[in-house]
Image (spheres, helix red, strand yellow):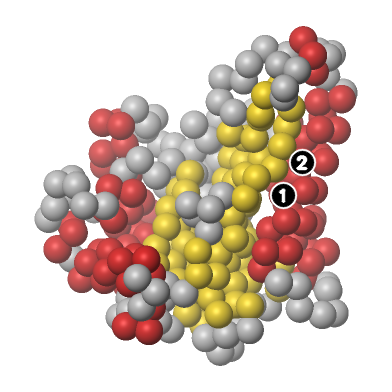
Amino acid sequence: MFGTLIGIFLTSTGIVIGADTVLWGSSAPHLSRIEKTCTPSQRSVAAFEGWYGERLSLHQQFQSVCKTLSRSRKPVPVDEQADLLIRKLMDKYREQQRLSAIPAAAMPAPGNPHIAFVAVAGFDGTMPKVAVRELRWEKTRKGQWSVKTARVGKLSFDGCGARFLGDDAVAALLLDRSAHFDRDKQRPEVSRAIEANRQRAEDNCFLSAFSVEDAKALYKLAVRATIDHGETFQMENGAVGGQLHLLTIPSEGPIQKVVIDPEQYVE
């Protein structure tokens, strides 16, 4: 577990990306929170979930590539932004592995094949979309473990809807058809998100009433529910939370960022 909850929401009036700031399980001294998003263009936001690397090297690579993308003189499609970010993270990770004293052929099976997710949400023209890529360990035909990148189809989407990634065991239950959190599912922001996901599946996003304000309220609710109920799902206390960063990409205009302190969402 890496201690992160990212929310990505495509609404009728813009895109919202939510990220917590807890720095969990890192050996970096004197740090307790970290910026998990960046803006690779004026019309997109990227988010990082996973292992930050030795001395936060993967996180630093993520931020560096974002800055490089932001200086591009021509628009870079959302998918290409995600591809570049994950490829550069893989390069950095492999560089660290080459410096390891253990040869790749002798490496044991990883405890968790997942290393990191990179999600880029933005507009390609007028179409809102999300591209998610994963850095992970995979076993080769020779039986050796190798680091690969992959597109994550179940988390990549366009048009409308809501997705969570990271430590989402609790948050995902808010959007499913189970009896969990039945009372919260009556809340308008949750019911409209569930409806938007259904409309996305039916290619009817033009009917979606899920709004930017709904998305912000849903993300705060998801974080609070994770804090309150995470231990029930084998999540360690304190792994998600801290300041919340909510970034909105409106249909027109600049990206807006709101910082929410814990006392504003924890009751």
Q: Amino acid at mark 1?
A: Ile
> Mark 2 and mark 1 in contact (Cβ < 8 Å)?
yes
Quadrant for residue 92, please give it: top right
Q: Is residue 230 left or right of residue 83?
A: left
Determine whether 25 is above or below 107 in the image.
below
Q: Nearer the viewer, residue 112 or 46?
A: 112
User: Which of the numbered marks, if any, corresponds to residue 86?
Assistant: 1
The local secondary structure at tag 2 comes to helix
Residue depicted at 69% across the width and 42% down the height: 149
Q: Amino acid at mark 2?
A: Met
Where is residue 174 drawn, in percent x and y? 26, 53
Where is residue 83 drawn, in percent x and y? 73, 56
Q: Nearer the viewer, residue 59 or 108?
A: 108
Mark-to-mark CA distance, 1 and 2: 6 Å
Q: Which residue is mark 2?
A: 90
Q: Specify few, some or many for label 2: CA neighbours under 10 Å numbering under 14, 14-19, or 20 or more.
A: many
